[in-house]
Image: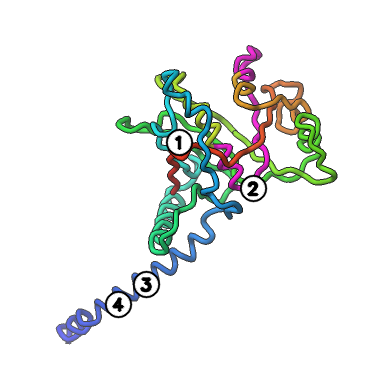
């Protein structure tokens, strides 16, 4: 009796295996539809070469071709969630390969936040990390007023969409190599692809003014009306700043996502 059951199972195993794999693939396909945020813009419209990348090597700094960017879920994400996101992203890549189309430039995991990592070939681990929000914040009069005043834009009752940079950190051994400048370009494109018009941040340099000046050199403007809204009333925790997003970035930019 046992032998007959084993033989029966063995004969049907290929069929069962095929059905199991099919069901698993279907489940993963269904999951990936709900794993990442919607991507309102075509990701490959970001193809212009950045001015910074043109001059990077001439100044002894890195360019996009030297860095591998990885868009990850935030650190507090559970291991199971990270595991399923990896599966979902691989399903998307497989679909793109089968359909012979380019994969998206970026896909942000649901949850509203992500971490952008900078990796250098031949060096173990990340050399920099940047925390960002990945969804349009709710309409806010202080943002609209700031945009109208700083950029002389007449919104006429409309509201702009914005996302934020939460933190920027580059390992001490890799500072002054241009990684921060390049990260600002990548983050700007990620925000633009996610339908955000402006990037916001709070620059905290303990009153020295150096960090604020650095951001100003890279296109940010001070936005005093956002101090209270971004949790830094009267500049207590830094200077609030704003910059328009863009979909222009060097074609050499390599961005990987789970």
Label for residue 195?
A: 2
Q: Position of residue 9 (x, y in %)?
A: 23, 80
- Compared across the picture, whether 164 is left or right of 99 comes to right
Q: Position of residue 212 (x, y in %)?
A: 64, 19
Residue 108 in view, yes or no:
no
- Compared across the picture, whether 201 is left or right of 258 comes to right
- Compared across the picture, whether 140 is left or right of 126 comes to right
Q: Is residue 164 above or below residue 15?
A: above
Closer to the chain start, of discs 4 and 2, is 4
| Residue named by callout 3 | 22
Asked if residue 13 is among those painted magenta in the image, a careful observer would answer no
Q: Position of residue 202 (x, y in %)?
A: 65, 27
Closer to the chain start, of discs 2 and 3, is 3
What residue is rendered at 47% in x and 43% in y? 72
| SS for callout 1 | strand
| Residue named by callout 4 | 16
Q: CA distance from mark 2 to mark 1?
A: 22 Å
Query: Magenta segment range?
Result: 187-213
Q: CA distance from mark 3 to mark 1?
A: 34 Å
Q: Is label 2 or label 3 in front?
A: 2
Q: CA distance from mark 2 to mark 3?
A: 35 Å
Q: Is label 2 or label 1 in front?
A: 2
Mark 2 Cα-neighbour bin, 10 Å: few <14, some 14–19, many ≥20? many
Mark 1 Cα-neighbour bin, 10 Å: few <14, some 14–19, many ≥20? many
Mark 4 Cα-neighbour bin, 10 Å: few <14, some 14–19, many ≥20? few
Closer to the chain start, of discs 3 and 1, is 3
Q: Is label 3 or label 4 in front?
A: 3
| SS for callout 3 | helix
Closer to the chain start, of discs 3 and 4, is 4
């Amino acid at each position: 009796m046992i032998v007959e059951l084993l033989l029966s199972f063995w004969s049907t195993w290929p069929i069962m295996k095929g059905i199991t794999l099919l069901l698993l693939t279907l489940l993963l396909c269904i999951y990936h539809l709900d794993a990442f945020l919607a991507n309102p813009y075509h990701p490959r419209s970001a193809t212009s070469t950045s001015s910074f990348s043109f001059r990077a090597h001439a100044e002894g700094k890195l360019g996009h071709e030297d860095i591998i960017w990885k868009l990850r879920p935030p650190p507090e994400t559970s291991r199971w969630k990270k595991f399923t996101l990896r599966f979902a992203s691989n399903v998307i890549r497989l679909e793109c390969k089968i359909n012979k189309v380019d994969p998206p430039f970026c896909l942000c995991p649901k949850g509203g936040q992500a971490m952008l990592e900078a990796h250098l070939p031949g060096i173990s681990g990340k050399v920099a990390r940047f925390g960002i929000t990945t969804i349009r914040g709710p309409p806010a009069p202080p943002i609209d007023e700031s945009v109208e005043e700083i950029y002389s834009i007449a919104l006429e009752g409309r509201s702009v969409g914005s996302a934020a940079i939460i933190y920027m950190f580059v390992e001490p051994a890799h500072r002054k190599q241009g990684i921060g400048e390049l990260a600002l370009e990548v983050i700007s494109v990620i925000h633009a692809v996610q339908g955000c018009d402006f990037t916001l941040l709070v620059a905290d340099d303990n009153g020295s003014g150096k960090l604020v000046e650095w951001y100003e050199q890279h296109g940010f403007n001070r936005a005093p009306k956002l101090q209270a809204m971004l949790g830094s009333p009267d500049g207590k925790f830094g200077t609030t700043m704003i910059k328009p997003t863009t979909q222009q970035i060097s074609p050499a930019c390599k961005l990987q996502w789970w």
